[in-house]
Amino acid sequence: MTYLSRPDRRLDEIALGQCDAGPVQDDAGGRDRPDAHPARFDGREAAGDEPQQRTPAEFLGAAGGRGFAACRGGKEAAGRYPPGQAGGRAMSTAAAVWRFLIGPPLRIRQLAKQQLTPIEGLPALSLDALTSVAYGPEAIIVVLAAAGLAALHLVLPISIAIVALLAVLVFSYRQVIEAYPGGGGTYAVCRANFPPSVGLLAAAALVVDYTLTVAVSIAAGVGALTSAFPALSPATVPICLGILALVTGLNLRGLGDTARAFLLPTMVFIAGLLTVIAIGLVHPLAPHASRQGQSLAPTQGLEAVGVLLVLKAFSAGCSALTGVEAIANGVPLFKQPRVTRAKRTELLLGGILGVMLLGLAVLANRWHIGPRSGETVLSQVIAISVGRNWAYYVMSVTITVVLMLAANTSFGGLPVLTSRLAGDNYLPHLFSLRDERQVFAVGIWTLAGLAGVLLVAVRGQTLSLIPLYAIGVFTAFTLSQSGLVKHWRKTRPARWRYRAAINGIGAATTAVATVIFLVTKFTVGAWVVVLAVPALITLFVRTHAYYARCGRALGLDMIPAAPHAKPTTVVVPVTGVDRLTQHAVAEALSISPRVVAVHVVVEDTGQDTERDRELDRRWARWNPGVPLRILHTEYASVTRPIVTFIDELHEQRDEQIVVLIPVALPHRLRYRFLHNHLEMALTTALKTRPDVIVASVPMPLHIP
């Protein structure tokens, strides 16, 4: 079965293109033709006539008189319908509300409005990395504190090593942007330099990381909010889902609108934190202020300061580097020249994040800041630097807001990645389609759904998500750097050995961090990632295998034989003589001159005969130029007689059968479930029939 829904275009328009001419009329308008009288399926002609046995094909033999209209060529004019209408008709209330929320459709030439400048790229694609300063330095301090307060002096050298790794990653991803400007980042690098399985590993790791980024960012922001306002704690999950819905809606409008909406809090966060660091370095305002909560560092070290502890602290602090890859994944989202703007944004991100990490490490080392109950490391730094005044609370609120908004990084990166995967036949092709706002809406909805499920599963608790975090992105870091080493060896540009050496060192470093993440966090939740990545790879492989088989079945690599048209018979199920029937019959005649209307009567107490005759008389008076077939049945199902009638048509003639079902569409959504039961039943009965085309013919109803 082929099912075509036709809300505002005729079936021939859908099949042929921009055809908007009406059906060609007879000279007599179909009113004086002798074959226009109704007849019965059981052979009885209209009331008063002698019974005559005729097969369905014989019955249709004389039906005709109309043909296809000439279809005017040419492309449908852009902007043909006003913004408040869809397909030339007024939108429903629900559609109007949705259009208000996500904005009007964008033409291709308007796409530049949703593309990014380097400054807009910071809130759109870099918030995840920038806000990692809220938990990256703290992760280092928490690990080192296990060896006692004396081990906290290592926070500065470890932070310097992390910033050096950040510089390597920024250098690498700037090269990725230049070498693979089509987006996809790590996946594009691995696809070009390794076997397909390695590229799929990178893609699966990034999908996991992007999903976790959304959940962790929102949960962390809401956690900060509920810490400030404990009364909101019972509503943690609804608040998380509300923020997720807000971010999703903004991204459905377009990344440019999202970036502009998030630009102010992002700039306040960057400028405010850099100011806090500068004041703390030059002249802190409250160096002797009392600190809140109790120290969580043991008085005696529980762990010796050794290589393993330092490596654990280093890998924990590397969580501050998540999100660095998002810009390389989203190069097509930038304005032209895309490569230049994307590289500039990557450099901005690296510079700002590096200064923040080093500044916070210097201050934490200078003031001997350790983990405390009820207060984060970043909060302690701000309190000592500027005091607990209005500036402290403004920064605290700003950090909470940008932590929530950091989820936007994934919404910029994952839809582009999934579109690349779909283009390579590793995901359904639906992921590669843009919607009216020129965004990859399917990827956005998929990410929102996965993150929503994750937030509900962990009840919005950040600590439940942290063990899963960063493994995926560090796997991608390692693969990307390794791919670039091979890229330089193949292309051998100027100074290729120097570039390959830097990428090789970066790949080895991130590989060590990945292994440490897996070993230290496996039993507390990292096993979920270990299972999720192979599951995604299996999905990619099976999808690709299906498309390969499908391509062979469709003969995509061969030129098919010339098509041959088949005569078409249109069957129109009707319930009476009314405007809906008139609308459906007119549409049927625009498809083929061979049209038959069918009406099903369930035989019961004999009253069906009188109803039949009344319908016969009304049809004869109307005389639409189309024969009516009344199908009798002793069963309750109205679909079985129609299916039997279609089977008999196929037995008599080799024709294409089109079943055109009239559908009433009330303008109010709440009335629609009161209509169209025949459409649902008949569609269900015919959905497995490859020899039948089923189309609905909607007619709007404006009921006061």
Image (spheres, grey):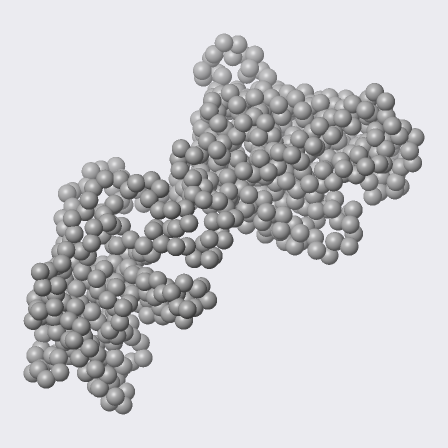
| Residue at the farthest top position | 494
Q: Quadrant of residue 144?
A: top right
Tell me which residue sits at (65%, 44%) in the image. 218
> Which of the pair 122/511 is nearer the observer?
122
Q: Is residue 374 left or right of residue 606?
A: right
How many numbered discs, if any?
A: 0
Q: Is residue 267 above or below residue 3?
A: above
Q: Quadrant of residue 92?
A: bottom left
Tell me which residue sits at (19%, 83%) in the image. 613
Q: Is residue 362 left or right of residue 704?
A: right
Q: Position of residue 644 (x, y in %)?
A: 22, 71
Tell me which residue sits at (60%, 21%) in the image. 347
Q: Position of residue 412 (x, y in %)?
A: 54, 36
Q: Is residue 67 above or below residue 413?
A: below
Tell me which residue sits at (54%, 22%) in the image. 343
Question: What is the quadrant of the C terminus in the image?
Answer: bottom left
Q: Quadrant of residue 104?
A: top left
Q: Is residue 338 left or right of residue 159?
A: left
Would residue 161 be visible to someone looking at this image?
yes
Q: Position of residue 94 (x, y in %)?
A: 47, 57
Would residue 159 be visible to someone looking at this image?
no
